[in-house]
Image (spheres, rainbow, N blue to C red):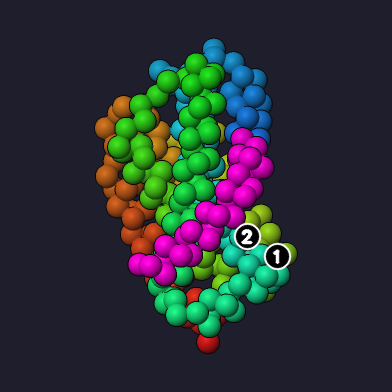
Amino acid sequence: MRGALAIYQREMLILRKRFFRQLASMSVGPLLYLVAFGFGMGREVRVGDRSYLEFLIPGLVAMNSMIQAFAIASEINIARFYWHIFEEFQAAPIRNIAYVTGEILAGITRSLFSVAIIIVIGLLSGVALSYNIYFWAAVILNSFVFASLAVGLAMLVKSHSDQALLTNFFITPMAFLGGTFFPIDRMPEWVQQVLSLLPLTHASKAIRSAAFGERVDLASYLLLAALGTVLFVLAFHWVNRARE
């Protein structure tokens, strides 16, 4: 546990040093989407009995928590390729499980910061939703899934260009197709079946249901928890391979 906290503290010190730049970076995307899709389409556009702006905010929470949790991979790659910090971890008395846990906790923390920013932006826009325990549980599980994926993939890539390729092929399409900007039940049946395989689809559904104060589907929570656990184990395995 002490090793995990040491890894986590290191990442938090880096985040604190760049805090205001990171804060600005985390705010730009949600603000652009909010202006382009939320205000651009207007409050007259409705999804069910909710305004599109109310529909959009939980989607942005799901999308940004995924992006910021996955962004820990870039920090790991910088540490590996330029600062050679990973080699120092290899020599230090830190277990692999502690390294994985610390990096994943750092990814989740980054994600929670980004969610807080979106909530503030939403409140300033006049959108007040229910940010209850189910909401935060869905956010944390979504962050856990993508932070675990980030740590694992960071051990497999050989350069920043490889990392960018993974982001472009997996994270970016998921951000737009995972039920963030439109309800997937309006898509053709076969498309719905494909999109139901995406973890972000289940995260968006869980976060939106909780934010609207509706009954949540526990199956989505269980699926995210199971997937996150599998990815955590894979990340641990890939760290072991990288250290050999």
Q: Is residue 12 visible?
A: yes
Q: Please tell me whether residue 5 is drawn above or below residue 123 in the rendered image.
A: below
Residue 157 location, quadrant? bottom right
Q: Amino acid at mark 1?
A: His
Q: Please tell me whether residue 79 is drawn above or below residue 112 in the rendered image.
A: below
Residue 171 position in % (x across, y down) = 58, 52
Label 2: how many Cα within 10 Å (few below 14, some 14–19, many 20+): some
The secondary element bearing badge 2 is classed as: helix
Q: Nearer the viewer, residue 7 or 126?
A: 7
- Residue at point 54% right, 18% down? 125
Q: Nearer the viewer, residue 176 or 196?
A: 176
- Residue at point 58% right, 74% down? 86
Q: Distance from label 1 to label 2 (Cα)?
A: 8 Å
Residue 122 position in % (x across, y down) = 51, 24
Determine whether label 1 and label 2 are within 8 Å by CB: yes
Give the labeled residue for mark 1. 160
The secondary element bearing badge 1 is classed as: helix
Residue found at the very far top of the displayed protein: 44
Give the labeled residue for mark 2. 74
- Residue at point 38% right, 50% down? 141
Query: Quick one: quadrant of the N terminus?
Result: bottom left
Residue 103 position in % (x across, y down) = 49, 62
**Is-magenta flag for residue 232?**
no
Q: Is residue 183 visible?
A: no
- Residue at point 64% right, 48% down? 18
Q: Nearer the viewer, residue 86 or 71?
A: 86
Magenta range: 1-27
Left or right of 167: which side holds 106?
left
